[in-house]
Amino acid sequence: MKTIAELEAIRQKTLKEVGMRTDNDSIRVVVGMATCGIAAGARPVMQAFLTETQKRDIHNVTVTATGCIGVCSLEPIVDIIDKDGTKVTYVNMTPEKVAKVVLEHLANGKVCSEYTLKENQ
Amino acid sequence: MQLFRSHVLVCGGTGCTSSNSEAIMSELNQNLVKNQLDSEVKVVQTGCFGLCEEGPIMVIYPEGTMYCRVDVKDVPEIVEEHLLKGRLVTRLLEASSQVQEDNQDIEQSSFFKKQLRVALRNCGRINPEEIDEYIAFDGYKALAKALSEMTPVEVIQTIKDSGLRGRGGGGFPTGTKWDFAAQQVNDEKYVCCNADEGDPGAFMDRSVLEGDPHSVIEAMTIAGYAIGATHGFVYVRAEYPIAVHRLQIAIDQAREYGLLGENILDTGFKFDLEIRLGAGAFVCGEETALMTSIEGKRGEPRVRPPFPAVKGLWQKPTILNNVETFANIPEILLKGSEWFASMGTEKSKGTKVFAVGGKINNTGLVEIPMGTTLREVIYEIGGGIPNGKKFKAAQTGGPSGGCIPASHIDTPIDYESLIELGAMMGSGGLIVMDEDTCMVDIAKFFLEFTVDESCGKCTPCRLGTRRMKDILEKITLGKGVMSDIDELETLARDIKASSLCALGQTAPNPVLSTLRYFRDEYEAHIRDKKCPAGSCKALLAYEIIEEKCKNCGLCLKNCPVSAITGNKKEKIPFVIDPTLCIKCGVCFEKCPVDAIKK
């Protein structure tokens, strides 16, 4: 038998998983997954975003794939789009860099400027 | 718990299942493994999205992209392009969103924009076989609220204040019905759910049970608390195997979580449910016949009063509500009666689900606020009439209802306005007819249905409907006389007045309603021996217009009974021999220069 509190706990837990199916105002992490991106290692980068956000229990983030952005030499490229629409583009990403971006940008709201497109052109 | 970055929802309603959505799911899973995406992307089977015409439907989140008419062959492309590389498979997008590729929000497509999903809130959003997903979207929260914060009287008052009326057809205020049963003093009371959806073309209740069975279980438990019942029955047609299967899974899961059974949510309240299968008799949708059938007897109606709220199942006080009515209850308790009453018209609150079918582009399931006009349903949500044909009428309420002619297309849909037009809300079947539909033939179709389904217990229904059908048949065969119309009207009046139950009392409605708006069509059949819609075969005669004929010979080549003679080379004109013609219409369709008239 479940109590009302246990029911609420199930709700909270499952909502983390299915919340993406309703209108949400989450931060979007968009990974370039065209041929160039995949060849440069976009798959492990994307997987790193999934495992790192899960590890840190960050749930207002959706991770999606997109096509070629055009600067293939800087792949893997990741855009992080905030709730207000501001976009930060990270380039030459690796799973190690992802760990830092998740901690600083997604968890603490601080842009990791050393990996951004601005700093690496 | 594993978190996925993307969920692929595949419709598992009856419509999409019959167009192979199960094979699509297994192909999806295989391709995800092949592309090593199975730990990132989750495949979820859901209930009906509503756009059945475009099925099988697939929706991919978080983007909310909707793919239509997906074939098993399309799956590898969707996985590699959309899920792996993040590129849209444009050709499979829903038509209205193909125009604006940057806006993939399905809520904004013309089919969904005007809809307001309350009863269908979870259909196409959750996996109906996972109780946790229902709980995530506030499932069983209303039950918890009722049991822990509200008295039964407060629950009933909330339902009364909301203005909710029965969605099965009658439109009786739900709260008042519950109140009657609550006031009865008895050692045992029952809660019944009428899921014996029988109108031709209606599938609202099936879709709710398939897509969101827990909402019905939760609402029935709340009803049990409100009236003081500990036992409930869901009476559902055996022809709905997917609905029955998912409902049983849901009941088992609810029991496992202690949401059914003893001491629910540790509040001391007990309630349990069981399913009873109906064998498909239309009359068992009538409340007294339904209860007789649950008791294990032959499903025949009885005289009311006493009403079920006083003497129902096994002579005990019983409430009977339709599936859609129940599906609204949890939302009303959670969001309040003012919220519900803010939707709809003065006397019809909330929303109504319609199964739209017939001559319409977007066949499917729509939920609209009461007061939406028929024009909005047909031309905006429904996408209009196929092949540029003209809208003629819409039948609501199935064999018990009537038609709304084109001249009343701007009528807001609610209980009162439909009754005024001689139609009725009914359970929500909405059959759209175009200029090629013969209204006498439609009336005959519904009468044939009621003749078949009359249980035979009372004479007016058993014999009266058959007499009406015979007269209609005579008219469509061109053998009618003018006095037939008077006789139809007399019979209709008598059957309505003297039948035992609603089946007979409403059976003449399709005839009365077509006579009211399309009397001229009846008269044309009788007086001129012509069917204005060109649909009654016996009154048709195909003829070749010699001046228009280009002597191509296509009609002759395609005629299945060699009723056409003529010769291109020898310039013998083409003619149809009416004694041989079977009026199949093939020549009419094949003629490239419209030289054939009917």
Image (cartoon, grey):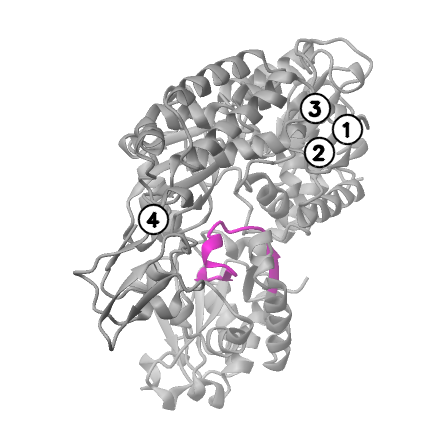
Alpha carbon of mark 2 to alpha carbon of mark 1: how far? 7 Å
Which comes sooner in the sequence, label 4 or label 3?
3
Q: Nearer the viewer, mark 4 or mark 2?
A: 4
Is B60 part of what is drawn in magenta? Answer: yes
Q: Please name the residue that numbered disc 2 is placed on.
A: B235
Magenta extent: B43-66
Chain identity of mark 1: B
Nearest to the eye among marks 4 and 1: give it: 4
- Which numbered dot is residue B294? 1
**In the structure shown, which secondary structural element does the residue marked by tag 1 occupy?**
helix
Q: Which residue is mark 4?
A: B541
Left or right placement of residue B311 versus residue B179 in this view:
right
User: Residues at marks 4 and 1, common chain?
Assistant: yes
Q: Residue B81: image x %, image y %?
A: 46, 77
| In the depicted structure, whether residue A23 falls above or below residue A112 | above
Q: Earlier in the sequence, mark 2 or mark 3?
A: 2
Amino acid under label 1? Ile
Which chain letter matches label 4? B
Q: Quadrant of residue B574?
A: bottom left
CA distance separating discs 4 and 1: 52 Å
Residue A85 appears anywhere in the view: no
Q: Residues within 10 Å of mark 2 (few under 14, many from 20)?
A: many
Give yes or no for contact between labels 4 and 2 (Cβ–Cβ under 8 Å).
no
Residue wearing tag 3: B289
Dot 2: element: strand
Q: Earlier in the sequence, mark 2 or mark 1?
A: 2
